[in-house]
Image (spheres, rainbow, N blue to C red):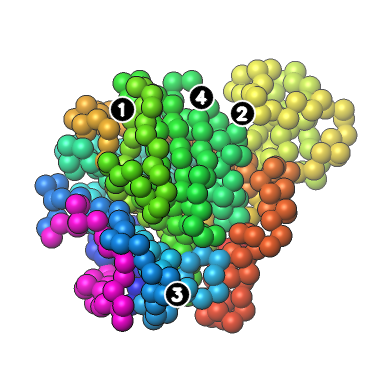
């Protein structure tokens, strides 16, 4: 069985037109010498026909029986992929579970794109509000969103309410302004992530995020609480997340992340007791599958260049502060965004450093970890019927969330070395980050031996 990443074929920048996959991947996988002790949940298997009426593709993995520690997994069944941070595909019972998740991740991506209605996409750059709606009808919304006026990153979001209780959400971000190491830190250090991400009144936010169990270095279980929002209840969710390394695939080198929730009604998930929802104001969302594709990008993070050798005085008349040391926070001319538009009214992230005429003591902080090409495909079971969620609400909330979070992600790239995330990375001398760096940098790997001129690389 060949498990190379699926390839999306585009036509003239109008979005995905078709999906190419190998015959081995599209057909049923051949059985290994010993049958795996895990299978894809048959309660929501991929439908044979496309369209809104098709049954959703659930990628939940359920144990048929407790696997034997001696269960073999041949390396050939992994193709070019492996668990992230491992030098080679593993063998044994745990590998059966991870391999099933990898196959489910690739199948989910195909299913979400198959159900996605046709649409044409244009850039939202230059639009007054930084967003542009391409389609809003039949339970489907597609829009382009620019998260920061001076960043190269742009997001195309699709929300497809294809069923009464289920929806597909897909995001494609070009020039994503947070490099791989900061992104891995956001995933691996959830307690710091909750404190770092912004909270704005009137918008939902993550209240609590914790890793409650870990099966392997790349395989975690999260417990997540999200605040209530308007008529929507808050979330009390449990999600399993696994990361895979597919960088040696010649057609589409990338990293693959896959998330899935324990099935509704399950009390035990992979041997771990699933907590019950206790609050009446909370509901449990069931991620039937979420696939993340991460590739290195050659795009710059920002369109700005350093305006001077030293930090000058804020350009707002009467302001006594220096410009923000991060270009993304003040465009290299102001102490904060508010001072740019409302002189003297400083934002909470303003440097608040009084300008003394020198300004040389505060050095510019520039993006150090590059950009990514990011794709996200999610199939989710909602706690309320989709006909109670107007597309107008989705159209209103999506750009606001993107414009709230994206500048903070740019700051993470610029200020990573000064944040607690970096301290965790430094303290992790022999742990997760070292395993990932060693695996991705190994000189004998095909992805590093190709040496194509101008080929983008992850910055670690």
Comparing 35 with 406, the one in front is 35
Instruction: Assess whether mark 1 and mark 4 are in contact (beta carbons under 8 angstroms).
Output: no
Comparing 383 with 120, the one in front is 383
Q: In this rendering, which labeled residue sits more in front, label 2 or label 3? A: 3
- Residue 56 lies left or right of residue 283; in this view the side is left
Q: Secondary structure at mark 2?
A: helix
Q: Secondary structure at mark 1?
A: helix
Sooner in the amino-acid sequence: mark 1 or mark 2: 2
- Residue 176 lies left or right of residue 23; in this view the side is right
Instruction: Tell me how far mark 4 sits from mark 1, CA to CA.
Output: 17 Å
Residue 189, numbered circle:
none
Q: Which residue is mark 1?
A: 393
Q: Which residue is mark 4?
A: 200
Seen in the picture, residue 354 relative to 251 is either above or below; the reply is: above
User: What's the residue at 87%, 30% (across, down)?
Assistant: 357
Residue 102: percent from left, percent from top: 37, 64
User: What's the residue at 71%, 34% (across, down)?
Assistant: 324
Residue 337, numbered circle:
2
- The quarter of the rendered structure image containing the N terminus is bottom left
The stretch in magenta equals 20-48
Seen in the picture, residue 297 relative to 441 is either above or below; the reply is: above
Comparing 253 with 356, the one in front is 253
Instruction: Tell me how far mark 1 sits from mark 2, CA to CA.
Output: 27 Å
Residue 91, numbered circle:
3
């Amino acid at each position: 069985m060949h498990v190379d990443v699926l390839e999306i074929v585009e036509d003239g920048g109008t979005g995905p037109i078709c999906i190419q996959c190998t015959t081995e991947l599209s057909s049923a996988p051949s059985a290994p010498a010993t049958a795996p002790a895990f299978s894809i949940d048959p309660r929501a298997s991929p439908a044979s026909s496309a369209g809104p009426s098709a049954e959703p593709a659930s990628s939940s993995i359920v144990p048929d029986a407790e696997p034997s520690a001696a269960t073999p997994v041949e390396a050939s069944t992994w193709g070019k992929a492996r668990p992230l941070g491992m030098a080679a595909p593993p063998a044994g019972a745990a590998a059966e579970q991870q391999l099933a998740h990898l196959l489910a991740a690739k199948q989910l991506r195909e299913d979400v794109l198959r159900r996605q209605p046709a649409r044409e996409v244009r850039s939202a750059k230059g639009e007054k509000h930084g967003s542009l709606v391409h389609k809003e009808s039949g339970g489907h919304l597609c829009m382009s969103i620019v998260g920061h006026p001076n960043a190269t990153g742009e997001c195309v979001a699709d929300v497809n309410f294809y069923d009464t209780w289920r929806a597909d959400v897909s995001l494609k971000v070009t020039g994503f302004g947070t490099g791989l190491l900061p992104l891995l830190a956001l995933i691996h250090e959830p307690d710091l992530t909750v404190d770092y991400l912004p909270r704005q009144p009137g918008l939902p936010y993550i209240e609590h995020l914790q890793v409650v169990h870990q099966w392997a270095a790349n395989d975690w279980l999260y417990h997540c609480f999200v605040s209530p929002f308007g008529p929507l209840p808050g979330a009390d969710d449990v999600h399993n997340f696994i990361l895979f390394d597919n960088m040696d695939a010649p057609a589409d080198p990338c990293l693959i992340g896959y998330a899935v929730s324990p099935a509704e009604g399950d009390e035990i998930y992979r041997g771990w007791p699933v907590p019950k929802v206790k609050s009446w104001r909370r509901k449990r969302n069931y991620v039937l599958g979420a696939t993340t594709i991460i590739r290195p990008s050659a795009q710059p993070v920002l369109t700005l260049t350093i305006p001077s050798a030293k930090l000058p005085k804020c350009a707002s008349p009467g302001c006594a502060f220096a410009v923000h040391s991060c270009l993304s926070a003040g465009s290299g001319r102001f102490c904060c965004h508010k001072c740019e538009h409302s002189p003297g009214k400083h934002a909470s992230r303003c440097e608040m450093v009084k300008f003394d005429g020198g300004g040389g003591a505060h050095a510019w902080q520039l993006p150090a970890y590059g950009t990514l090409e990011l794709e996200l495909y999610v199939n989710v079971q909602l706690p309320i019927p989709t006909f109670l969620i107007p597309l107008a609400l989705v159209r209103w909330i999506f750009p606001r969330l993107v414009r709230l979070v994206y500048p903070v992600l740019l700051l993470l790239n610029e200020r990573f070395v000064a944040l607690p995330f970096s301290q965790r990375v430094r303290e992790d001398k022999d742990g997760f980050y070292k395993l990932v760096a060693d695996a991705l940098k190994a000189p004998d790997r095909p992805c590093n031996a190709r040496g194509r001129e101008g080929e983008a690389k992850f910055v670690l």
